[in-house]
């Protein structure tokens, strides 16, 4: 597994909120392989992977979220740490817990503007 492989699951908010969260992560991981859909889904997903890397700068033009969004990031410990750091720089983030395995980690964050 590459150190950039990351799966992001989002619940709460709307499609624009999901896009704002994914936009922040693009600054760290580069463009996602899969983006949140435009449907009226209650859970959205984005996947980052491969060797692509973002600039590390994150987005500075992040729009406020319409409501709190629960984000679960899953991947290598390094990818989860980088994603959590990027999201905490752009939103108010509350750590809702983590689970660690041998090679993967999962962390849940509650994001607010």
Image: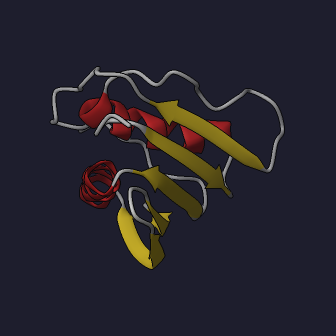
Quadrant the C terminus occupies: bottom left
x and y, in percent, of residue 28 in the image: 25, 36
x and y, in percent, of residue 32 in the image: 46, 25
Foreground pick, 110 / 53? 53
Quick check: 90 left or right of 70?
Answer: left
x and y, in percent, of residue 38 in the image: 74, 27
Quick check: 15 left or right of 75?
Answer: right
Quick check: 35 left or right of 106?
Answer: right
The answer to whether 36 is drawn above or below residue 87 in the figure is above
The answer to whether 44 is drawn above or below residue 85 in the figure is above
Q: Residue at x 54, y 58 (%)?
A: 71
Foreground pick, 98 / 45? 98
Q: Is residue 26 visible?
A: yes
Foreground pick, 20 / 48? 48
Q: Residue at x 33, y 58 (%)?
A: 84
* Residue 56 placement: quadrant: top left
């Amino acid at each position: 597994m590459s150190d950039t492989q990351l799966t992001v699951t989002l619940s709460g908010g709307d499609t624009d909120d999901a896009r704002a969260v994914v936009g922040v992560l693009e600054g760290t991981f580069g463009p996602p392989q899969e983006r949140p859909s435009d449907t009226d889904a209650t859970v959205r997903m984005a996947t980052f992977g491969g060797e692509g890397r973002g600039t590390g700068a994150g987005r500075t033009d992040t729009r406020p979220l319409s409501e709190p969004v629960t984000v679960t990031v899953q991947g290598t410990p390094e990818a989860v740490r980088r994603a959590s750091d990027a999201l905490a720089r752009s939103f108010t983030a509350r750590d809702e817990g983590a689970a660690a395995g041998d090679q993967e980690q999962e962390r849940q964050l509650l994001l607010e503007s």
